Image (cartoon, rainbow, N blue to C red):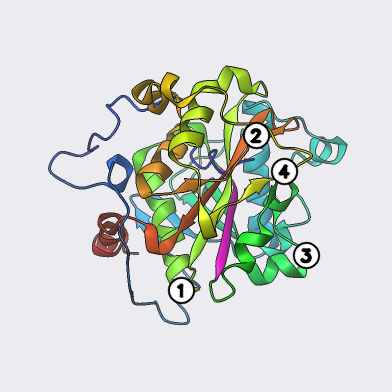
Amino acid sequence: MAFDVLLGLRQPAKQKPGALPQRGRFSPFGLMAGARQRSVFSYPGPDALSGTLGRSGSLEVRLARGPREIWRAQRLRYRVFYQEMSAKPDVVSRMFRRDADRFDASCDHLLVIDHAARGRFGGIKPKVVGTYRLMREQAAWRLGGFYSQSEFDIEPMIARHPQLRFLELGRSCVLKPYRTKKTVELLWHGIWAYVRHHRIDAMFGCASFDGVDPDTLALPLSFLHHHATAQGEWRVVAKPERYVAMDRLPAGMVDAKAALKSLPPLVKGYLRLGARFGAGAVIDRQFGTTDVLVIVPVASIDQRYLDYLDGEAGRYAA
């Protein structure tokens, strides 16, 4: 759960798929292009992640600094997942109004903070308005595996790439008033800085469709199955006991234009990056979602997207 809740963007953007959100300027969030191979890129210095990773107006993106800020991220997750969406909290979550699990302490937590937000009495009170949980491979194995492994058999994929560094993305959400292109770009600016700093080679995580009836999702699931399933060395399959077939319609019955329109915005965005998906979906009844696994090798990300993140870094300079 929660990979496609990154932005909480549950409604399609009011533009045609593939349209550029800003006239005359490339934006990765409007790109419909094939993947290109990428060779080398520069890395930030050892202190690059210790401070602000970027700013846009009153919004700042950076990593959480200590338990209190992780607690604020967990409170935001509770508000979005359990109060706004259809997730079902357990007794502890309901009592403390936090979405927390055993993985949080071993992860880095990316935050978007609004420094102009106002408190209940009208005064300025900076507020965490977006978050994304980042788990590197070393931390995952210390805990016995990644969060996604409860749904998907990712170990064979990782074993096939012993020389690569993997990063799991998850537990992502944005407060409803902030679900804008600016917040999206700030989050990705932060993620890209993190990927470069830690020399990450591949990212993956669960993407979610609303609802637990796969037959109502037959069109988008079938589209991903026929057109975007990872093959060969990147193939990942849902756990046998949780496997839900995605080929619910034959290829000839899949209307690609309609299918793209029905995809959650973040799933659509990852397709535009050149991402591929695992075989089989999983029903997550706690969160009320149908999950698929997204796989993004850094080398397969479209070069124009990487140029945008590197070349436009000045837009979000602290």
Upstream in sequence: badge 2 or badge 1: 2
Q: Is residue 169 a member of the stretch shown in magenta?
A: yes
Disc 2 vs disc 3: which is toward the camera? 3
**Mark 3 or 1, nearer chain start:** 3
205 left or right of 14 in image? right
**Residue 157, image quadrant:** bottom right
The residue at which mark 1 appears reads as: 197
Whole-percent x and y of residue 7?
A: 48, 39
- Disc 4 marks a residue whose amino acid type is Asp
* Relative to 159, 143 lies left or right: right
Q: Nearer the viewer, mark 3 or mark 4?
A: 3
Task: Tell me the magenta residue range.
Answer: 165-172
Of helix, strand and loop, which one carries label 1? helix
Q: Which residue is mark 2?
A: 81
What is the residue that sits farthest to the right in this orientation? Answer: 91
Residue underneath mark 4: 99
Q: CA distance from mark 3 to mark 4?
A: 19 Å
Report the residue marked by disc 3. 143
